[in-house]
Image (spheres, rainbow, N blue to C red):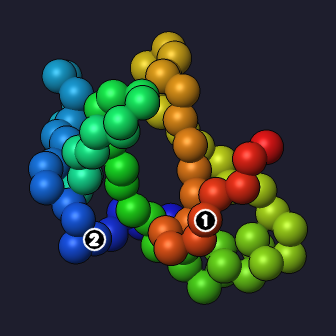
Amino acid sequence: MRPTQHPSNNDVLGAPPGVSIEECKPLAITRVIYERAGPAVWSFWEPSPEERAAIAGGALVRFSCWGRTHPPVSIGVDGVQERPW
């Protein structure tokens, strides 16, 4: 998947210290504040035709994050209401 611009984008994340821009390109993000949970960051991703076909065929979407751990995350589809687990 490739990161893509979204009308709500209001900031950009750069590469972490010591990582070149060739290894980690800037990522457009949207900073939001949830009433009950506080600040959060959204980024938007566009699957390639091959990825779309794999997802439609039942493939899972993988989330990767640099570092040793990450905070709780949510992955959804823009414009589709999330259902409780």
Residue at (42%, 30%) from the top-left corner?
36
Q: Tell me, for residue 81, which label it has, or none.
A: 1
Q: Quadrant of the C terminus?
A: top right
Q: Alpha-carbon neighbours of circle 1 within 10 Å: few (<14), some, or many (≥20)?
A: few
Image location (x, y in percent) of residue 37: 42, 28
Residue 53, compared with residue 38, is above or below; it is: below
Task: Name the amino acid, label 1.
Answer: Gln
Q: Which residue is mark 2?
A: 6
Camera-near label (1 vs 2) is 1
Image location (x, y in percent) of residue 27: 25, 52
Residue 55 placement: quadrant? bottom right
Determine whether label 1 and label 2 are within 8 Å by CB.
no
**Residue 41 visible, this orientation:** yes
Residue 56 placement: quadrant? bottom right
Q: Secondary structure at mark 2?
A: loop
Q: In the displayed structure, does residue 61 sit left or right of residue 57?
A: left
Q: Nearer the viewer, residue 65 or 19?
A: 65
Residue at (86%, 68%) from the top-left corner?
58
